[in-house]
Image (cartoon, rainbow, N blue to C red):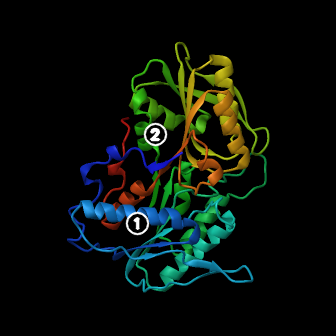
Amino acid sequence: MTEGEIAGEGFFTPEGFAKDQMGKMESPRGALMVASCRSGSQLANKTVQRYREFLSEAGSEGEIPFLDGIDYQFANSETCVRLDEHVSGCDVYLFQALCDPTGEGSVDQNYMALLIAARALRENGANHVTAILPYLAYGRQDKPTEFMREATTARLMADLVAGAGVDRLVAWHPHCGQIRGFYGSMPVHMLEPLTLFIDEFERFRGREDAIVVAPDAGASKLVTHFGRALEVECAIGSKHRPRPDESEISQIIGDFAGKRVAIVLDDEISTGGTIFNLVSKLIEEHDLEEIYLAVSHNRCVEQGRERLQRLHEECRVRKVVVTNSIPQTDEFTELPFVAVRCLSGTLARTINRIHYDRSVSEVFYRPEG
């Protein structure tokens, strides 16, 4: 498996990177600076390097101040953040991987590091703090489970982030779009994976023997836009969760006559139960020859790895495409049928657009209608 630059860069417009402004005028937001907590360090480094490459291509010079790994733990397990440089007057982009299966910190510890880092930046004079959270943890807790006494935890996390001093948020393909409303007037950029997925499967454009499948209603809008863009038919699975982290696919609704290739799109793989049940049913009922999977986030759970391996060996899954929104473990990157797409190019362009007060959405593929 190789880790490549994000697919879909071809969809960016010529104005996708503000070449006309690089090195020629100051941003009204202040001096650009990138900072990272330890779990966000890997993607932050790649994004800074990509930004510098874009600067070079635009004929501009200059360094980007980068504060790397600014959090640490005391012996008593408390988190502390110390800044090695002045940040007063800066427009800071703070990276953190809230879910990091390659590190020792839990989601809750990583969230705490983010909050303390944001507060440290604001208390020391940063003009703006934009949180770059490729995987927005607690996104699935956007409402209480029916008939259960639960908190709307996604809203709580939004309150904490705002209270810590973050005044803008960038996330990659959050679980639910309504989460944006939890942040009130704070600008929230929810970057969609449609551009990536279209470019990844461009070779299937107009193929009458191909069909794109949504595992459930939550993925149906993404699949519909994808199908229209590539001119392929769509199908949707009917999913039920009898218990937390368990799923059942009762039926797959769609016209599979003459179909030999299926492309399955979803936002996340954790234990892989939904994907496993869906693909197994596709093979059992429709005897497809090739199946491709593409998901925005891979949680790197061992049970999920085992299920993907079985799907590859037993159910004709040819390729699984994921991103590095979550740092990927060696156990997954060593699988020869898994491809990791790097988000550094997308994030570099997004930071550039925000820093110069330009529209982020303009540089992505936009479906009609």
Q: Residue at x 40, y 66 (%)?
A: 48
| Rendered view: 294 above or below 290 | below
**First in residue order: circle 1 vs circle 2:** 1
Q: Position of residue 74 (x, y in %)?
A: 69, 83
Mark 1 and mark 2: span between their CA atoms? Answer: 24 Å
**Residue of label 2:** 197
Q: Secondary structure at mark 1?
A: helix
Q: Amino acid at mark 1?
A: Val
Q: Is residue 181 left or right of residue 143?
A: left
Please state, as top left, top right, bottom left or bottom right, where the N terminus lies in the image: top right
View extreme (top): residue:
257
Q: Is residue 36 left or right of residue 249?
A: left
Q: Position of residue 160 (x, y in %)?
A: 60, 70
Q: Residue 70 or 274: which is nearer the viewer?
A: 70
Residue 228 visible: yes
The answer to whether the residues at label 1 and label 2 have Cβ atoms under 8 Å apart is no
Of discs 1 and 2, which sits in the foreground? Answer: 1
**Residue of label 1:** 48
Q: Position of residue 26 (x, y in %)?
A: 26, 74
Mark sitting on residue 207: none
Q: Secondary structure at mark 2?
A: helix
- How many tags in the picture? 2
Residue 186 visible: no
Question: How crowded is the residue under tag 2: few (<14 C-alpha within 10 Å), some, or many (20+)?
Answer: many
Q: Residue at x 63, y 61 (%)?
A: 100
Q: Residue at x 72, y 79 (%)?
A: 77
Q: Amino acid at mark 2?
A: Phe
Q: Quadrant of residue 322?
A: top right
Q: Residue 139 or 87: which is nearer the viewer?
A: 87
Q: Quadrant of residue 138?
A: bottom right
